Amino acid sequence: LTRIGVGSTKLRPTASSAAMRAVTRALRLELASAADPVACEPTQRIRADACISVLQQPDTTPVSLGEQVALLSAATDGLLDEAVHTRDAAATDQLLRDLLAAVSAAAPELLPKVSRSGELTEAQAAELRGHTREFLAREEGQTG
């Protein structure tokens, strides 16, 4: 997990795209902090669980850069904390697939544009957060 979103460079590992750098800035620190059972706050553990959940990809169907950025953005922004915390692994996987489908339906060009450009602008990040919040509110209404 120490090379999340990291391209190959011999001197210093860096994320391979600006979009990935934007959503993984503090991810390694968050995961390392959550691994400390003594000093870890429950909220840190929940956030780390959300991050780990979005990093799980089936070997046969890797996700695109845009999809990965969308999921990591939702996890690192804390939007997935409660949703992942209250679901088992299978339900979490389904939730994440449904989230990507909802974002793609709401903004069909957003994720492909991030994939093509490798960039995530503030406007795109805000749009992703908005679509993610709308989706999670609908999900909460259906399950709550």
Image (tube, rainbow, N blue to C red):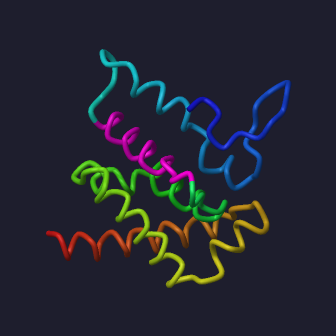
Q: Determine the residue located farthest toward the left in the rendered image.
A: 144
Q: Is residue 44 magenta?
A: yes
Percent across and percent down for residue 116 are 77, 69
Q: Between residue 61 and residue 89, name the one nearer to us.
A: 61
Percent across and percent down for residue 117 are 79, 66
Percent across and percent down for residue 38 are 30, 15
Left or right of 137, for residue 55:
right
In this rendering, the answer to whether 127 lies above or below 84 is below
Q: Determine the residue located farthest toward the right in the rendered image.
A: 10
Q: Between residue 123 and residue 7, name the one nearer to us.
A: 7
Quarter of the image where one finds residue 47: top left
Left or right of 58, for residue 64:
right
Taking the spot 71% from the left edge, 39% from the top edge, the residue there is 6
Judged by its main secondary structure, the magenta piece is helix
Q: Determine the residue located farthest toward the top in the rendered image.
A: 38
Left or right of 110, for residue 132:
left
Percent across and percent down for residue 98 are 40, 71
Q: Between residue 114 and residue 65, name the one nearer to us.
A: 65
Quadrant placement of the C terminus? bottom left
Number of numbered discs on residues: 0
Taking the spot 80% from the left edge, 27% from the top edge, the residue there is 12
Image: magenta residue range: 43-59
Taking the spot 22% from the left edge, 52% from the top edge, the residue there is 86
Quadrant placement of the N terminus? top right
In this rendering, the answer to whether 87 lies above or below 100 is above
Left or right of 18, for residue 41:
left
Q: Is residue 123 magenta?
A: no
Quarter of the image where one finds residue 83: bottom left
Taking the spot 48% from the left edge, 33% from the top edge, the residue there is 30
